[in-house]
Image (cartoon, helix red, strand yellow):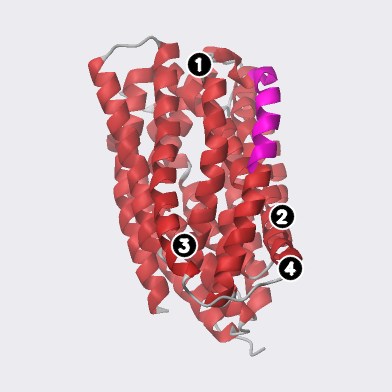
């Protein structure tokens, strides 16, 4: 377990610094773009993240899982096949994206260069995923931590310098913000792939054994395809959510401009602050996927039960402390972004959403490691259906509006966390109270 704690420490420490930088990034964006511009920026982010997801094909998950389960002598062969898959997939996706990019309407309200800038992400994310997956599987979390930190530093530096030296109109300012985001991914690619090439030279000197090509591809696809489908569904619903929320608010009687401003304060301020401690949950997720995979492959259910208990305890401690701070100091925190009481109310009402999401991320890592990706997918589908139904229903009422939207978001998070948790307990043979472990 020591190697897992070491990995969590490295990732959490760098992520803490990164989230601190992200906080300043969002402050700069809020002040330079204004509430309406920030709303536009937050509205296009899900679409950019969707492209990132498709480009990664979740290879970092499948590679890390396969690397963790196999002996060192198989790693060279696994990486060769993974790179071949990546080259083929990236070429096809790049051709398709180039053909249809000009017909995607979401980019119409932004600078013409934006739609072509995002194409850069396809090869960058694809090859970064291979390197990231290998380092995750080998528990070289220090390299992942440095990469995550570099991303935030570059984005902050680029925004600070460009906005400090020049004045931009809203459209150009949005272009600068998106360019800085994409540029940060390029920096991560340059660092991780360089480290991957260096590490691969060592791998080539280790005695190796070949695995059947079809077996490697089958194992990688068995994780990548359903995981990509799961992430794709989440990304698509995430891309739909801004328009669903704004449509519900407009239906309740707000103007389109006010609805966009409210959404900008929700996502750009309340969500930015509330998800600040999620760096711990994300660090746990990265470490747990290969860790649970290896332990599950060995059939060591007592260790899995112990891991779940430790993760639950750790998450409860920092999660309760975090939402307590957000709830009681919401006005002071949100005033760093806007001189308005509205985002403070949003932040206070969203405490169940944040708390349960801190549990959801490590729970999903457990389910992936336990080969229960389909169960995870079905849980997400049900939670989204329930959440979106409540958002449209309550958000459309003038007496509810954003409060109704937030109730829908909270309900979806609680439902998803509970479904994940009950499924894990049943799979590894432990009671829902984390006591009286069942011997398998």
Predominant secondary structure, magenta span: helix
Of circles 4 and 2, the one toward us is 4
Q: Is residue 397 left or right of residue 304?
A: right
CB within 8 Å, label 2 to label 1? no
Q: Is residue 3 left or right of residue 216?
A: left
**Crowd band around label 1 with a 10 angstrom C-alpha radius: few (<14), some (14–19), many (20+):** some
The residue that mark 2 highlights is 226
| Region in magenta | 90-105
Of circles 3 and 2, the one toward us is 3
Mark 2 vs 1, N-terminal side: 2
Mark 4 vs 1, N-terminal side: 4
CB within 8 Å, label 1 to label 3? no
- Secondary structure at badge 1 equals helix
Tag on residue 200?
3
Q: Label 3 vs label 2: CA separation?
A: 28 Å
Residue 201 highlighted magenta (yes or no):
no
Of circles 3 and 4, the one toward us is 3
Q: Residue 100's x, y, as percent? A: 70, 24
Tag on residue 215?
4
Q: Label 4 vs label 2: CA separation?
A: 17 Å
Of circles 2 and 1, the one toward us is 2
CB within 8 Å, label 4 to label 2? no
């Amino acid at each position: 377990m020591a190697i897992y704690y070491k990995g969590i420490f490295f990732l959490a420490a760098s992520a803490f610094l990164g989230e601190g930088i992200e906080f300043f990034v969002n402050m700069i964006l809020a002040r330079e773009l204004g509430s309406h511009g920030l709303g536009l920026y937050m509205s296009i982010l899900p679409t950019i993240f969707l492209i990132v997801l498709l480009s990664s094909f979740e290879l970092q998950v499948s590679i890390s899982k396969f690397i963790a389960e196999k002996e060192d002598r198989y790693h060279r062969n696994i990486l060769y096949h993974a790179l071949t898959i990546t080259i083929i997939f990236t070429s096809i996706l790049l051709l398709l994206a180039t053909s249809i990019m000009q017909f995607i309407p979401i980019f119409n309200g932004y600078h013409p260069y934006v739609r072509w800038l995002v194409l850069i992400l396809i090869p960058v994310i694809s090859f970064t995923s291979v390197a990231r997956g290998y380092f995750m599987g080998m528990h070289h979390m220090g390299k992942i931590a440095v990469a995550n930190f570099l991303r935030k530093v570059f984005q902050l530096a680029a925004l600070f310098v460009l906005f400090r030296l020049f004045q931009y109109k809203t459209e150009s300012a949005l272009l600068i913000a998106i360019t800085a985001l994409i540029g940060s991914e390029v920096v991560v690619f340059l660092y991780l792939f360089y480290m991957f090439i260096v590490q691969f030279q060592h791998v080539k000197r280790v005695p190796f054994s070949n695995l059947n090509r079809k077996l490697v591809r089958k194992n990688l696809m068995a994780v990548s395809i359903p995981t990509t489908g799961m992430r794709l569904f989440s990304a698509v619903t995430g891309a739909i959510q801004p328009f669903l929320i704004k449509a519900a608010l407009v239906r309740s009687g707000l103007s389109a401009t006010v609805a966009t401003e409210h959404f900008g304060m929700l996502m750009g301020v309340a969500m930015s602050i509330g998800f600040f401690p999620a760096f711990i949950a994300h660090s746990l997720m990265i470490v747990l996927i290969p860790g649970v995979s290896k332990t599950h492959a060995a059939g060591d259910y007592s260790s899995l039960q112990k891991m779940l208990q430790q993760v639950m305890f750790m998450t409860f401690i920092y999660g309760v402390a975090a939402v307590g701070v957000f709830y009681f100091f919401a006005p002071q925190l949100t005033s760093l972004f806007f001189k308005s009481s509205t985002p403070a109310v949003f932040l206070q009402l969203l405490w169940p959403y944040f708390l349960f999401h801190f549990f959801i991320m490590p729970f999903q890592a457990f389910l992936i490691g336990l080969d229960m990706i389909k169960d995870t997918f079905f849980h997400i589908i049900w939670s989204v259906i329930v959440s979106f139904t409540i958002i449209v229903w309550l958000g459309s009422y003038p007496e509810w509006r954003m409060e109704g939207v937030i109730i829908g978001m909270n309900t979806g998070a609680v439902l998803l966390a509970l479904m994940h948790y009950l499924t894990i307990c049943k799979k590894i043979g432990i009671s829902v109270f984390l006591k009286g472990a069942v011997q398998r």
